[in-house]
Image: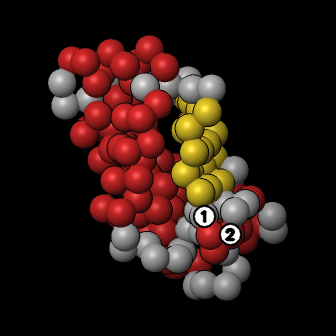
């Protein structure tokens, strides 16, 4: 990752990540371990002005919304807290993308700047996946 990209990631980590992480933890009802594979989230094909929007809409907002849906009752909160160990955000699967849940790890493996506005579809995928595995 070059210096320009490192600066962009640092800016996101300082300006956006704290409130997004707080919203995620609040929705889950506990502090969630988050592993962001930043280097894979750098998309040189698009203007870096879109990165923050993409990272938020592709990774964070669907996860937050899914946690809110799952944890809308005590049973869901207890199930999520009992089983979820960590979340991984990365872009290795490319265009096909993948959302998986295995051994307590929710992995959102999507391109960060493709179909950004399909937040509801990603949210539903995460909810369905978690509900069938918790």
Q: Residue 17 at x, y = what percent?
A: 47, 48
Query: Which quarter shows the N terminus?
Result: bottom right
Label ID, residue 45: none
Outermost residue, right direction? 2
Task: Tell me how the rendering is colored.
Answer: secondary structure
Tag 1 near tag 2, CB within 8 Å: yes
Local SS, label 2: helix
Q: Which residue is drawn at 37% across and 34% down?
A: 131
The residue pinned by badge 2 equals 94
Q: Distance between the residues labelled 1 and 2?
A: 6 Å
Local SS, label 1: loop
Q: Residue 91 at x, y = what percent?
A: 67, 61
Q: Residue 4 at x, y = what percent?
A: 72, 71
Q: Is residue 24 left or right of residue 55?
A: left
Q: Residue at x 26, y 38 (%)?
A: 68
The residue pinned by badge 1 equals 97
Query: Which quarter shows the C terminus?
Result: top left
Residue 21: which quarter of the image? top left
Given residues 111 and 96, the one toward you in this image is 96
Outermost residue, front direction? 132
Near mark 2 (Cα within 10 A), the count class, few <14, some 14-19 or many ≥20, is some
Residue 117: which quarter of the image? bottom left
């Amino acid at each position: 990752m070059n210096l320009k990209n490192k600066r962009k990631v640092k800016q996101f980590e300082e300006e956006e990540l704290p409130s997004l992480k707080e919203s995620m933890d609040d929705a889950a009802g506990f502090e969630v371990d988050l592993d962001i594979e930043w280097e894979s989230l750098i998309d040189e094909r698009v203007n870096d002005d879109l990165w923050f929007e993409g990272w938020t809409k592709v990774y964070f907002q669907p996860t937050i919304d899914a946690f809110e849906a799952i944890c809308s009752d005590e049973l869901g909160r207890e199930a999520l807290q009992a089983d979820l160990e960590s979340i991984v955000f990365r872009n290795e699967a490319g265009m096909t993308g993948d959302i998986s849940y295995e051994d307590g790890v929710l992995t959102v493996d999507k391109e960060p700047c493709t179909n950004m506005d399909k937040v509801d579809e990603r949210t539903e995928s995460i909810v369905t996946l978690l509900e069938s595995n918790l």
